[in-house]
Amino acid sequence: MTMQKKKPANRKKIDPATAENFLAGADYAPDENRKADSQEVFLPWESPSVREDVTKVFNLRIPEPLYLKLKFLAENTPKTSMHKVCLDSIEGVVEHELKAVIAKLSEK
């Protein structure tokens, strides 16, 4: 039988300056879509800290029939995968939708 510890392990103390630096680098809030000093729209993917070699994970919930169609397509198409089919499909849609959103934001 293992005995439980009487008190939780000590947590590391956080330097307030480190915490402020962390918070300063946090993602922007959705309503902060303009640069503070101009009417120009802030585009987060153009930030100098964004790297092309970093991959982000995004889980997608899709109905089972669509999943099975996607799987069938990937299995029966040479040199492709479910991931590639999805990525190739959404990239064009995202770019198209961005143009419309940016145009609206630029009008304000």
Image: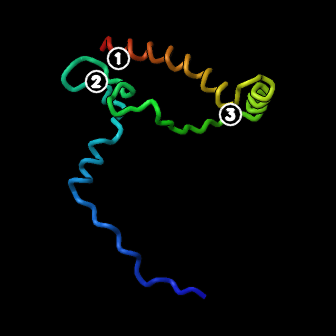
Mark 3 and mark 1 lie on one chain; the one further toward the N terminus is: 3
| Placement of the N terminus among the 4 image quadrants | bottom right
Q: Nearest the camera: 38 or 88?
A: 88
| x, y percent for residue 48 | 32, 29
| x, y percent for residue 24 | 26, 43
Residue 53 in the figure: left or right of residue 26: right
State whether residue 84 is above or below residue 64: above
Q: Which mark is residue 105?
A: 1
- Locate residue 63: give its quadrant: top right
Mark 3–mark 2 distance (CA, rounded to whole Å)? 33 Å
Q: Secondary structure at mark 3?
A: loop
Mark 2 and mark 1 lie on one chain; the one further toward the N terminus is: 2
Q: Amino acid at mark 3?
A: Ile
| x, y percent for residue 64 | 76, 35
Q: Are marks 2 and 1 in contact (CB under 8 Å)?
A: yes
The residue drawn where x is 37% and y is 32% is: 30
- Looking at this view, name the residue that lies furthest to the left: 37
| x, y percent for residue 94 | 52, 20
Q: Amino acid at mark 1?
A: Leu
Q: Nearest the camera: 54 or 72?
A: 54
Mark 3 and mark 2 lie on one chain; the one further toward the N terminus is: 2
Mark 3–mark 1 distance (CA, rounded to whole Å)? 31 Å
Q: Residues within 10 Å of mark 3 (few under 14, many from 20)?
A: few
Mark 2–mark 1 distance (CA, rounded to whole Å)? 8 Å
Q: Which mark is residue 62?
A: 3
The residue drawn where x is 50% and y is 14% is: 96
Q: Nearest the camera: 64 or 44?
A: 44
Q: Which mark is residue 34?
A: 2
Q: Secondary structure at mark 2?
A: loop
